[in-house]
Structures are given as C-alpha cells and as structure tokens.
Amino acid sequence: MKLHNQYLKLHSQFGGAAEISVTMDELAFTFGCTHRNAMHIVNKMIQLEWVQWTPKRGRGSRSLLQFLVPSEEIALQSMMQAISRKDVHKAIEGIKTHASSSSLQDTLQGWLLTYFGHHSEIRSDKQIDTLRLPITQQLHTFDPLHMNLLAESFVSSHVFDGLVRRSGERDKIVPSLAHAWEVDESRTIWTFFLRKEVLFHHGKVLTAKDVVYSLGRLMRTSKRTLYSYIFKEIQQVHALNPSTVQITLKQPNELFLPFLCTSRAAIVPRDLEGMDESNFGRRPVGTGPFKVVDMNEDTCVLEVFPYYFQGRAHLDRVEILYVPWDTETDSSDTGSAFHVIQNPSSTNSSSWSRIHSESYIRKFVTCNTQKKGPLSDPLLRAKIVSCLIDNSISVSQNSIEDQEISLQISTIPQYASDAEFIATKLGRQGYSCTVVSVSPEEFKGPVRLESDLIVFSLFRDEDEQLRLFDLYLTLSQHIEPHTRADIEGWLYTIAREPNPEARSESFRIIENRLLEEHHLYILYEKPTQTAYLPSVRGVSFNSQGWVDLRHLWFPPLLSTDSTT
C-alpha cells in the first residue's frame, strides 16, 4: 500500500501528465528518501508495469518517466487492500484524498460498502452474528446527561433503560425498569415499583438508589440540555425501599411520564459517583441489551449483554463506524453490502426493501426580534420570508434601504448547508448575509441572540410533543414580548393537559401564530426511511425512528452438506 501512495504522490506532484522529465534529485525529494531508495521505488513500479523509465546518465540529467496506469486504478487497488485488511478508516481517507471524479468515488464507496452489513461465522458450533453499521455523525459520549446528537441517543437507547418506555403504538407508554407505577390525585407524586434482580453490565443489581442518583444528576446540572424544562420541575426523588422510588414534582406536568421514556432519563449506576464522568461517557455501564466494549473517535463496538432482563438480543456484536459522507447504495445485490441502512440516499436495486418509520426531519428558520435590528419590523420579516418562498422577486423590487441590510444567520455544522442556501437566496435579492456555524454546545449560548436568523431542526418522532415544548420555549426567548407572553401561556396549558390530542392542537395554534407573524418559516420536511435486504428479520423502530437492534436477526447459516 505504501508503493501505491508513492505512485499517487509522484503522479500528483507532476500534475498528472502521462510523461514527465525528472531528475533523481526531484524523485528523491518527492519520495523523501535517498537517490538509491528512489531508484529502488521506481524499479518496483517498473516490475509491476506501472511505469516506463528511460534513464539519462550524468548528475542533474533529466530522465523520462511514463505513467502506464491511471492514478484512479492505483487508488482503487490501494483502497481495496485497506478494506481487505479491515482498515476502513484508511480506506475512507484514501477515497477522500484520491477520488478525483465522482464516478471513481462511487466505485470506491461501493467496494467499501462490502465491509458493512451482516457477517456470520461459526465458533465452537455457534453462529456469531455481527452487524456493521455506518453513521454520518461522529460519536462523542453516551452519558445521558451530556449527549447532544441523535446518533448518540440511538446507541444510548441500546445501552441504557428508563423507568418506562414507548410501546411503538402512538402515545402508549409501557413498563421498563419499573413494572408498575402510580400517581396521586394532585398529579405531582409519582411512585414507581422496580423489577427485581435487574443487572447492570458490571454485575451490580439495580435498586431505587440508582434511580435517585440518576435523576439527581439531572436536577443538579447547570447545563441547559434538551428537556431540562421538565427535570428542573422535579422537587424531590426518594427511595421508599430498595424496589420503590417516589418522585415529587413542583407542579403537575403531563409531559413528565413521556420524558421518562427518553434517553435523557436513562438510569445509570449510582457508583458512577466515584468514576471519571468523561470515561463513563465512552465506556458507559447500563442495564440495556448491549454493552459498549470499545469506543474511539471513529468506532463504537457493542456486544450483547446475555443477562438482559427483557431477554437476550439475537445479534452478538454491533460495530458502528463513523463514515464522513452520505453513503450511496445504488447497486448492491450481493448480500454483503448494507443489510440495514438509516436514511438511504438511493436504493434502486430490486433486492432492497424500504420501510418508513413515521418520523420526519423538519428544517426551519426563525427570526430573532429580541435583537435590535431590521427584523423587529414585521413588514421586513414578511419580505424576507417572501424572498425565501418566491424565486421571482428581483433585487430591483427591493428598496435601496433593503439592499443595505446585513443579516447574520446562526446554526450548527450539521445544518450549515441549509444556512448557506438561505444566505445565497437572500443574497440574490440584495441582502448581505453572514453564516455563523458553531458547535451544538455553543449554539445554546448567546450566539443565537446575537443573530438575525436562526436555522433549527425538529425531529418529529414519538417524542415530538416533548421536542415541540422545548423548541417553543427556546423560540420564545428571541420573540417580541406580546407574542412571547401568549406562547408561554399556551405552554403552561399544554403542560397540564392530559389529552395528547388536545396538546397537539395547542401546538398547532402556536405554530400558526409564528407563521402568520413571520417569526417562523419552514424550509422543508422529509421522512426518515430505512432500506434493508430481505434477509433481515425483526425490523422494527424505536421511539426516534431508528432501527431497534435488539429485535434484528438473520437466518442461520445452513450447511450444503447433508448427512444421515
């Protein structure tokens, strides 16, 4: 593989010409070696019929080097060697470095996909099933307190459990670590009865003290995290006995039980108190069907937890790899490419099936009217939104004053392309736009209130009402006072409404108000889909629309030999 890289480096150094005039000094400099070693490298390439060499004698003389093989073919060979050695990240880096054309990149990616999917082997008369999955978000932590990304939440949902969980049916909540629960007439005192003998991955038994510790971590944190508006409403968590825990709220909140289904409310062991929290985020200990056995910046490896209280998962091992591009899967009939793919970009082969998880991604932009600036003018907000809707508006239709307006658009890196799209579209109408992209953690800070336009997203899944509450509470921070007061009033009503359909109607009222006053503009909404090969069994979805790994299985390997 080193020789491949030297060929590509040489080819790139001299502009990709089919034939070059070169001195030994230049070759040695390019390879970073002595004259003797440079000649040795060239001789290897000659033996492989990659190059033709016509030497000229004399120091400083220029010899002729002819490239006989396209650089793309050498790059492909190099990447295939990396894949065969399971050096996936070396292959990815090579593709990014050497794929000079989209067709070559598609070819290289197609080969890379053979690494992913379902792989089985027989060990000691047992079939060991491994599923390799690509993700396009880099994983940082699985600590329920510190997670920011959906991909982290996806992994976390297989490592941890909550007191209760979603059943898969809309608005239905069923037992998990708690086998039953009660609430008093005031709807502020919730009592949960825990299952007995539930094991954490490190062998300790779950007790009510673990629940007290887990929720206490949320209550004590100074971070502004997703759903903090709910867990900050907890007044007290008390262990009545080893298997019973009582949670007292400051005031009734009908979103509290749905919150306990989320990965944010996952139960961690109380002995985490003596551990390094940063290490816990990378090697977490939960009660879930899989345990994390390895994690680095590119790879997360899960192994089945055989003592899971709801029954052993069918898969033995899951390897999740960060692949920093949107993976294509155009022509995989082989059975060795992806068996399970989240958000496939194109799956045309008849061997693939699609299933829709009933979850959606909505991207939108909102106006910050708390900032003293042009968007406090409702007429200008309306004009800005009309520019985003209607491509026919021209610069000549805008006033000179409009054309002198500068707008700052803030977002996070995952949505930077949407922000750039808005900036380009408004730029065509004469508005000067600057995009500021910051980390999710920084995005929670003052940057939003310093911007004019803010690009958000909403993941519409079974937790949609929780997300909407959090979203509108956040939006109200940068909306003019009279609209803010109305939104906060509706949110107060929603929190005390036991009927989910009535809550949905109130959320629609808030959305319509924001749209009518041009505080909010929805860019687009698209469903999340999963493509999978027919060999996959047990495909189902968790509350976030991700494939639930605990139910996946594959038919056993059948021997072609028949014995009597």
Image (cartoon, helix red, strand yellow):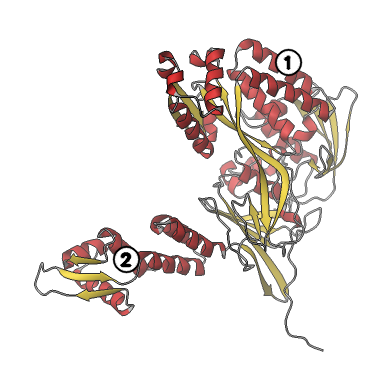
Which residue is found at the position 56% from the left and 23% from the top?
385
Q: What element carries label 1?
A: helix
Identified by mark 1, the residue type is: Gly
Q: What element carries label 2?
A: helix
Residue 146: x, y in percent?
61, 38
Which residue is found at the position 66% from the left and 23% from the top?
473
Residue 320, numbered label: none
Please count the marks in the image: 2
Displayed quadrant of residue 6: bottom left
User: Which quadrant, please, contains the C terminus?
Assistant: bottom right
Residue 15: x, y in percent?
27, 58
User: Which quadrant, please, contains the N terminus?
Assistant: bottom left
Residue 278: x, y in percent?
56, 43
Out of 38 and 244, give the one closest to the viewer.
Answer: 38
Counting other residues with Cα less than 10 Å from the Cα at mark 2, is it few (<14), some (14-19), or many (20 or more)? Answer: some
Q: Is residue 327 above or below residue 463?
A: below
Displayed quadrant of residue 545: top right
Q: Is residue 303 above or below residue 415?
A: below
Q: Is residue 79 above or below residue 476?
A: below
Displayed quadrant of residue 265: top right
Query: With 42 as the anchor, is 334 left or right in this view?
Result: right
- Residue 339 seen anywhere in this rendered image of the structure: yes
Residue 489, numbered label: 1
Q: Residue furthest right?
A: 185
Which residue is found at the position 43% from the left and 69% from the top?
77
Residue 425: x, y in percent?
48, 30
Disc 2/disc 1 C-alpha distance (Å): 67 Å
Identified by mark 2, the residue type is: Gln
In the rendered structure, which disc, 2 or 1, sits on the residue that comes first in sequence? 2
Residue 6, numbered label: 2
Counting other residues with Cα less than 10 Å from the Cα at mark 1, is it few (<14), some (14-19), or many (20 or more)? Answer: few
